Image (cartoon, helix red, strand yellow):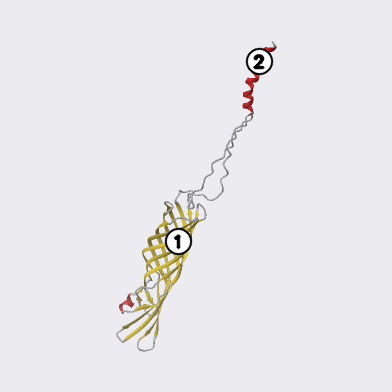
């Protein structure tokens, strides 16, 4: 009888050991929750789309002038100089890959002043007349451009680029005055003319180069140089202030500007010019058994 009890007790112990050992195992820990997403500006439209804004200053060249009445007596212009202009613009673009992007921009240019003189000699039917006029006025422009850029590679988040643009410019001459002196074989006399605002529109084109700095995955700062050809500009008709006479508009035959600008691009999506970010694999602690 004692032997049977001993055998039964041994069997029970043998059957209970696995269950006890299983119950003593450490539970398998679940993977840690992902870290909370950092707050910040996120893109919401699509990868590659960006907004841009630019401001800058330009050296505007106005060296070629024409006025029909001056040309009719073989008069000449002289004394034209460069002037400073300031501009601001905005645009929308698309970045196709790490080396090619395009955008469309619209900018306003203002603050430019011009001054030029002419000299002419003619016969008015009573004798030889010599006359000299001094023209002064303001120039402003609205410029729309379609631009294409080639990014030349990225080093330490700095990306040099080259680009070209073509579009349309409307140039306005405003506030123009025409002050002159006439010599007609006797005492000199003064003349004065004014002109209304005049607009001239035509093709504009640009060549540019610069460098961009990627502050983060969304924001890129830019600094660059641009040559911009704005086409032509002209005033309204010139009205003599003393006589009931008007004359042909003054034309600037070629407007060219050497621009230096700074700007920013806000990249929607998550572009990463500085290389892919290495993703760290999640860590799962090993299962440990205790017997």
In this view, the residue farthest toward the right is: 2
Q: Residues within 10 Å of mark 1 (few under 14, many from 20)?
A: some
Relative to 76, is 217 on the left or the right?
right
Nearest the viewer among 231 and 27 is 27
Residue 196 position by quadrant: bottom left
| Figure check: 45 above or below 10 | below
Do labels 1 and 2 touch, CB within 8 Å? Answer: no
Nearest the viewer among 248 and 241 is 248
Nearest the viewer among 137 and 60 is 60
Q: Is any atom of residue 21 visible in this view?
A: yes
Q: Residues within 10 Å of mark 2 (few under 14, many from 20)?
A: few
Please give the name of the residue rendered at 45% of the width and 61% of the height, measured from the top-left corner. Answer: 210
Q: Position of residue 272 (x, y in %)?
A: 48, 51
In this view, the residue farthest toward the top is: 1
Relative to 44, is 204 on the left or the right?
left
Please give the name of the residue rendered at 40% of the width and 65% of the height, measured from the top-left corner. Answer: 228
Name the residue tied to disc 2.
8
Q: Position of residue 101 (x, y in %)?
A: 42, 54
SS for tag 2?
Answer: helix
Please give the name of the residue rendered at 39% of the width and 85% of the height, measured from the top-left corner. Answer: 189
In this view, the residue farthest toward the left is: 125
In this view, the residue farthest toward the front is: 3
SS for tag 1?
Answer: strand
Q: Is any atom of residue 177 visible in this view?
A: no
Cα gap from disc 1 to disc 2, whole angstroms: 91 Å
Name the residue tied to disc 1.
210
Q: Position of residue 225 (x, y in %)?
A: 44, 64
The quadrant in which the C terminus is found is top right
Mark 1 or 2, nearer chain start: 2
Q: How many marks?
A: 2
Nearest the viewer among 54 and 235 is 54
| Figure check: 238 above or below 122 | above
């Amino acid at each position: 009888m004692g032997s049977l009890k001993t055998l039964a007790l041994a069997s029970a112990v043998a059957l209970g050991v696995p269950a006890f050992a299983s119950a003593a195992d450490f539970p398998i820990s679940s993977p840690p929750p992902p870290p909370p997403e950092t707050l910040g500006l996120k893109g919401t439209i699509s990868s590659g789309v960006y907004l841009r804004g630019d401001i800058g200053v330009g050296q505007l060249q106005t060296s070629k002038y024409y006025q029909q009445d001056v040309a009719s007596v073989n008069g000449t212009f002289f004394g034209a100089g460069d002037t400073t202009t300031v501009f601001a613009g905005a645009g929308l673009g698309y970045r196709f890959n790490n080396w090619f992007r395009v955008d469309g921009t619209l900018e306003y240019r203002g603050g430019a002043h011009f001054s030029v003189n002419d000299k002419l000699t003619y016969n008015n039917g009573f004798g030889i007349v010599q006359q000299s006029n001094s023209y002064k006025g303001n120039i402003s422009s609205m410029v729309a451009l379609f631009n294409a850029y080639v990014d030349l590679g990225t080093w330490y988040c700095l990306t040099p680029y080259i680009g070209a643009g073509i579009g349309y410019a409307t140039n306005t001459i405003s506030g123009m005055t025409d002050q002159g002196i006439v010599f007609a074989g006797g005492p000199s006399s003064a003349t004065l003319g004014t002109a209304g605002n005049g607009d001239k529109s035509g093709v504009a084109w640009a060549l540019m180069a610069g460098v961009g700095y990627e502050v983060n995955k969304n924001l890129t700062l830019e600094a660059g140089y641009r040559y911009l050809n704005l086409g032509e500009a002209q005033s309204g008709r010139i009205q003599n202030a003393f006589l009931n006479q008007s004359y042909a508009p003054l034309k600037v035959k070629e407007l060219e500007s050497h621009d230096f600008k700074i700007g920013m691009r806000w990249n929607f999506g998550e572009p990463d010019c500085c290389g892919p970010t290495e993703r760290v694999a999640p860590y799962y602690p090993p299962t440990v058994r205790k017997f």
